[in-house]
Amino acid sequence: MFEKVIWMFYTRIKQFFSAINSTINSKDQHFILLYLNLKEQKLFFDMDVPTQKHCLNVAYTCWELLQNHPKINKEVLLKAALLHDCGKKAGEVTTLHRVAIVLSQAFMPNFAKKMIQQGQTKSAGTLSNAFYIQSIHSNRGAKIAKKAQVPASIITLIEQHHDHLNKNAPMELILLQQADNAN
Ligand SMILES: [Fe+2]
Ligand SMILES: [Fe+2]
């Protein structure tokens, strides 16, 4: 348990510093154009740059994990990785919001619950709304992806990317969560 908390903080600190310096380079651009069609690219670029970079890093980790899983549908997993956080649009959950959310959830869970409730009716960009968006982003992302006619298999992965894994969980979801947790 203690190791898990330490690992979570290590990952969040790493995320924080990479978010501050995040830019999309030409290698990233090439990867996005290779795996996402125009409608999917719109979903990708509707996220802020730190979230775009996070999704790219999740996709690159998935790419590495795929080397040991040749039977998995590469297109499905990489598209899902690139789009998995599309339920958080630019300006809604900033890097500082993310720090506040992670710390509150770890040390003040009741406060976090209150913020989620309050945030439902608050405008985008406020701290409480960021708590709310963070809490619903998997389901919201699945709805946004459905509207953009993303294939059903990818929508399911977006919807379940924070769900508890049961013993029947598909390998694509296991790898997506593994890559998400590492980035
Ligand atoms: Fe997420
Ligand atoms: Fe993520």
Image: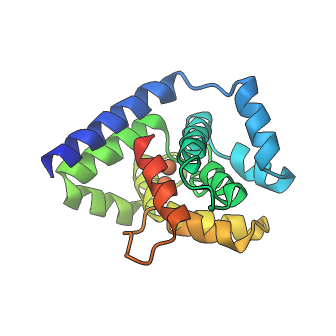
The residue that appears at 48% across and 27% down in the rendered structure is 18
Can see residue 140?
Answer: no
What is the x, y in percent for residue 3? Answer: 18, 44
**Residue 76 versus residue 61 in the image, above or below:** below
**Residue 179 versus residue 154 in the image, above or below:** above
Q: Is residue 152 left or right of residue 124?
A: right
Q: Quadrant of the C terminus?
A: top left
What is the x, y in percent for residue 137? Answer: 52, 61
Q: Residue furthest top?
A: 21
The residue that appears at 56% across and 55% down in the rendered structure is 69
What is the x, y in percent for residue 141? Answer: 60, 62
The residue that appears at 58% across and 44% down in the rendered structure is 55
Pick whichever, 149 or 123, lies toward us.
149
Q: Is residue 77 left or right of residue 133?
A: right
Q: Residue furthest right?
A: 38
Q: How is the image coloured?
A: rainbow
Q: Residue furthest bottom?
A: 168
Q: Quadrant of residue 60?
A: top right
Pick whichever, 102 or 62, lies toward us.
62
Q: Is residue 43 left or right of residue 98?
A: right
Pick whichever, 95 or 64, lies toward us.
64
The residue that appears at 25% across and 48% down in the rendered structure is 104
Q: Quadrant of residue 98?
A: top left
**Residue 116 versus residue 64 in the image, above or below:** below
What is the x, y in percent for residue 138? Answer: 52, 64
Q: Quadrant of residue 7?
A: top left
